[in-house]
Amino acid sequence: MGFPVSMKDDAARGNGPTPSPSRKREGDPSRAALVAQARETIVKGSQSFAMASKIFDRETRERVWLLYAWCRRCDDLADGQALGHDMTEVADPQARLEEIRSKTDAALAGETTGDNCFDALAVVANECGIPRDYIDDHIAGFALDADGWVPESEEDLLRYCYHVAGIVGMMMAIVMDVAPDDEATLNRAKDLGLAFQLANIARDIGEDAANGRCYLPRDWLAEKDIDPDNPIDPAHRPALAALAGRLAEMAGKYEESARRGTPELPFRSAWAVLAAAGIYGDIARKVAASGEAALDKRVFTTRREKFRWLRRGFQQARNRHRLYGDPR
């Protein structure tokens, strides 16, 4: 898939200083305690990711949980929600952004923050050498929301998706032992994050609008004569459903592109990634198939559907070199 030049440059950066190891102090949470809470966070925050994460080897799985916990906590703070649910309109977005920044800085400086999800970031960043600029790029996505930013174009939308999800894919790739200078594989990891976020946006159009947000590009809305200040007006439903389908189609293309990075991953990591791609890809496919109904009720995948992707992901991982070839 193609990206704006700035996004391609971001993937190749990865050279920022990594955090210094923190010093353990009496009363600090143990790594085991942080892992246990991180596991609880992913189980409650995303059944899809929680199921796929079980496939990783133990060390990678724990690190994935630790990174997820920080991402989940930042998102919850920014959106006024709990574990990804019950989003509310936020009255103090800049204060919440400052909390994210200050706790992240403190954790990476080796301080105990009193918030285990931020302390979890310090552990996984130190163990895996996650570049600091990756972490800052993720926070930049929350800054866009805090500033009331809206995408004017598809390129704007993709840049936002990069910050809130594409860079998370890249950090997860680092956790899976992808080298920071392996631009081709990191770009495929970024594609997977973009696919997930595009699926999220397609799924959550109605919920976002109810909370004063619309992530559909303004030029898309103009093409369909949709009022950006009231996109869920009943008169707009057919056009809005068409745009949700357009997002879902984009998500599918990025999902397919992401699969080309799996030959560079260890078997269990590739299996987990392919299972997650299929599970989350089904969300986008269901949005497209549901039409206007997807605007009223959140689409999800069933437990049986998730298990089916665990099986399919296993076979795809076994044959990934033949199926997906070189990530470049």
Image (cartoon, helix red, strand yellow):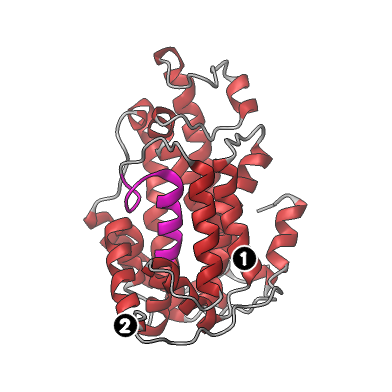
Q: Position of residue 22 (x, y in %)?
A: 51, 83
> Is 2 a magenta residue?
no
Q: Residue at x 43, y 21 (%)?
A: 232
Q: Residue at x 57, y 35 (%)?
A: 148
Which one is nearer the viewer's eye here, 67 or 272? 67
Q: With 190 as the anchor, is 35 left or right in this view?
A: left
Q: Earlier in the sequence, mark 1 or mark 2?
A: 2
Q: Residue at x 54, y 44 (%)?
A: 94
Q: With 151 as the anchor, is 50 left or right in this view?
A: left
Q: Residue at x 48, y 19 (%)?
A: 230
Q: How many marks?
A: 2
The residue type indicated by label 1 comes to Tyr
State the predominant SS element of the stretch in magenta: helix
Q: Position of residue 187 (x, y in %)?
A: 64, 63
When the figure is inspected, residue 115 is found, relative to residue 226, above or below; the finding is below
Q: Furthest-left residue in view? A: 304
Q: Quadrant of residue 37?
A: bottom left
When the figure is inspected, residue 225 is found, relative to residue 193, above or below; the finding is above
Give the quarter of the figure containing the C terminus.
Answer: bottom right
Helix or strand or loop: what does disc 1 sit on? helix
Disc 2 designates what residue? 32
Disc 1 designates what residue? 134
Q: Which residues are magenta?
A: 68-85
For the residues labelled 1 and 2, the Cα–Cα distance comes to 25 Å
When the figure is inspected, residue 24 is found, relative to residue 221, above or below; the finding is below
Q: Quadrant of residue 268?
A: bottom left
